[in-house]
Amino acid sequence: MLRDRILQYAARLRYPKLLALALVLFIADLIIPDFIPFADEILLGLISLLLAGLKKRKSRT
């Protein structure tokens, strides 16, 4: 499924690129509602990955 592929790809990204991807998806979803199927679920997954990455980053230091 497209949602799973996007989240698998995003799981390999680091903080700046992941944030940019989430921001682009959020803006696209605001401008054109339902342009991308399951955009809300993808966005929640990206934000979860982003927060998990920040938590890992803080625990390493």
Image (cartoon, helix red, strand yellow):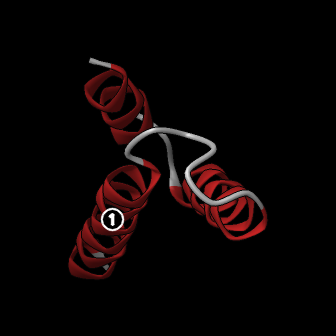
Indicate whether 56 appears above or below 11.
below
Q: Is residue 6 above or below residue 35?
A: above
Residue at left 31%, top 82%?
A: 58
The image quadrant where one finds the C terminus is bottom left
- Horizontal placement of 18 versus 20: left or right? left
**Which quarter of the picture shows residue 50?**
bottom left
Most foreground residue, 41 or 51:
41
Against 35, residue 40 (above or below) is below
The residue carrying mark 1 is 44
Q: Nearer the viewer, residue 61 or 34?
A: 34
Relative to residue 17, is residue 44 drawn left or right?
Answer: left
Q: Identify the residue at horizontal 46%, vertical 50% (top origin).
A: 39
Residue at x 62% of width, y 66% of height: 26
Residue 51 spot, x, y in % from top left: 32, 74
Q: Position of residue 5 (x, y in %)?
A: 34, 21
Q: Secondary structure at mark 1?
A: helix
x and y percentages locating residue 1 in the rendered image: 26, 17
Q: Which residue, as the protein is rendered here, is positioned at the far right?
A: 31
Looking at the image, how many numbered discs can be counted on the residues?
1
Q: Position of residue 42 (x, y in %)?
A: 38, 50
Residue type highlighted by circle 1: Leu
| Residue 38 or residue 45, whichever sits in front | 38
Q: Is residue 14 left or right of residue 19?
A: left
